[in-house]
Image (spheres, rainbow, N blue to C red):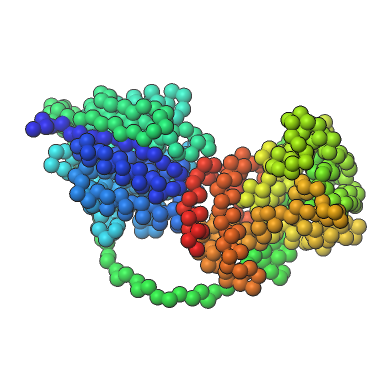
Amino acid sequence: MNYGFVKVATAIPCVKVADCQYNAQHIIKQIAEAERQHAEMVIFPELCITGYTCADLFTQDLLLREALKGMQQIVDSTKGKQCIAMVGIPLEINSVLLNCAVVLQNGMIHGIVPKTYLPNYREFYEQRWFCSGTGQETTFELFGQKVPVGTNLVFDTPTCCFGVEICEDVWAPVPPSCFLALNGAEILFNMSADNEGISKHSYLRSLLSQQSSRCLAGYVFSSCGFGESTTDVVFAGNGLIYENGTLLAASQRFSFEPQLVFSEIDVESLRMQRRVNTTFSASISHLVKERAVHIQTERTVQRAFTLTRPIEAFPFVPTGKELDERCEEIFAIQVCGLAKRLAHTHCQTVVIGISGGLDSTLALLVCARTFDKLGLDRKRIVGITMPGFGTTDRTYQNALQLMRSLGITIKEISIKEACIQHFKDICHDMNVHDVTYENSQARERTQILMDVANQENGLVIGTGDLSELALGWATYNGDHMSMYAVNTSIPKTLVRHLVTWVAQHDVEESSRHTLLDIIDTPISPELIPADEQGNIKQKTEDLVGPYELHDFFLCHFFRFGSRPAKIYYLAKIAFAEKYDEDTIKKWLKTFFRRFFAQQFKRSCLPDGPKVGSVVLTPRGDWRMPSDASAELWLKECEGL
């Protein structure tokens, strides 16, 4: 006899953000260990198959598919095991994405419980990705099994009844677990992603103790731990087991290792408490909810597929008359954004670095138009050209001529001597043209811009574009930083057209000639000395790949949520006459490797105006953990 004790476990597995295979294997190991130690039930953290902190990656079809593959492996691994496991996963059910707990045992899925309350305040943005489980009661086919779905499921076993809620549910004024308890659940499980904060842990313990006491129930809590993204918050790995207000067991907080915490809940005692407590019995209500009818349809037969619709190679760049209209509108948005920032700060001076390249040219044109609209003297635009070791005469002369023709204040400050002194200070051989050599120059230029802005009581205007942000092609705290970034959502393929449009419609002839030459200049950061003929030696597209490919990849990944295989398929059609398959595959791998690795630069971007459907600001359209794993996307690229 077990005398009414039910052995339960709370698990905190190893996790890598967005690496479903890795996560599934560690979940499988912990289920096996829980079975070996004779636990009847084990609860895992919220969204543990993907990681809770995937952010906008939850919109990606590839991640959702890989999560299902991981769940299938977990379900198969439980065949022959009696321990009941509750595993967190994002599930698309009836075209709605739900944050779910899947209850499984012995190769069978017994139910799916979606989260009821989705926090959308302070550090939480769950309503951005998920829908509430309220009203989603249905039957869903998962891996060939017809499974009940609902927030009102109570699971009956030979030893006890239990129910599941998810994280925020228990923080609600009336948690779903109250209704589960009144409908017979004696043990309540909560899979959570509860981040840390000053005094929050003690409040959490008080909350769980109170809820287990109020419901006269066992309460088993599992929350995310080490491995989740620390981009903005930290998860300490809280595993807590309560019985009617009493803490029975707890995990070690802030552990870097996986944990399984066990205890036994006295269900017989809880049943007695409920019988004695007449207030509990008086509160019991039998809730009957309508259930959706699942209609079985025949599976579609796999057929050969040929795409007949056209695929645009330049999705950010319209053609014909629409291009002019688009450029005019975008330029107006940039000008309006900067004008508001100047008005808000009562600032009448801007400082901008002018390199003779496309991005700084567009930013300067925006400044000039903005000052005209505000009735400000263009002489309050301080353009600074900062020749360095890689500056060519072509870009240097274009920078000077452009500033002269636009009538702004011109400053020329060479960075060579400052960088040479800096190399001496840090004991760096200036003949070694490595990342230190390059980034020192970018940071020196940024320091000059910031300090001159302080002298002039002005704002530094950023020049970096969307494509560079996607690839991380910027020096952290160098050209990466500014006080307002007017090009932040303009892709490189569109920058060229915008400058062309301004040259044709918005400047005098004296500026037009210079602009056209800038448009024809190879894209380069000019951080490596020129060749023997004085030509640009360091060409960006030779290093990171053609921007027209990367903009194509970015659009289909971000805007349409396409997986690498689909992007590759579409790119082969769009660029059939320009790039071979190996070239497309090479740069696609580069795109995903750099996009994931360089997110930390996007997580702290300066303000800037959104102009299109794709923008990577962390305050708007794209929130992604800086330490998310790229494994799923790179693995698919390798298999192309």
State which quarter of the image contains the N terminus.
top left
Foreground residue among 92 and 525: 525
Residue drawn at x 78%, y 38% as measured from the top left? 430
Name which quarter of the figure residue 576 lies in. Answer: bottom right
Rendered location of residue 580, percent (x, y):
61, 69
Name which quarter of the figure residue 159 lies in. Answer: top left
Foreground residue among 355 and 441: 441
Q: Is residue 323 visible from the viewing direction of this image?
A: yes
Q: Residue furthest left?
A: 1
Taking the image as shown, residue 351 lies to the left or right of residue 295, namely right
Rendered location of residue 550, percent (x, y):
62, 58
Residue drawn at x 82%, y 53% as measured from the top left? 531
Taking the image as shown, residue 192 lies to the left or right of residue 454, namely left
Residue drawn at x 34%, y 33% as measured from the top left? 259
Q: How many marks?
A: 0
Q: Is residue 335 visible from the viewing direction of this image?
A: no
Residue drawn at x 81%, y 31% as measured from the top left? 421
Name which quarter of the figure residue 292 lies in. Answer: bottom left
**25, above or below 549, in the image:** above
Rendered location of residue 509, percent (x, y):
90, 60
Rendered location of residue 420, percent (x, y):
81, 35
Foreground residue among 182 and 85: 85
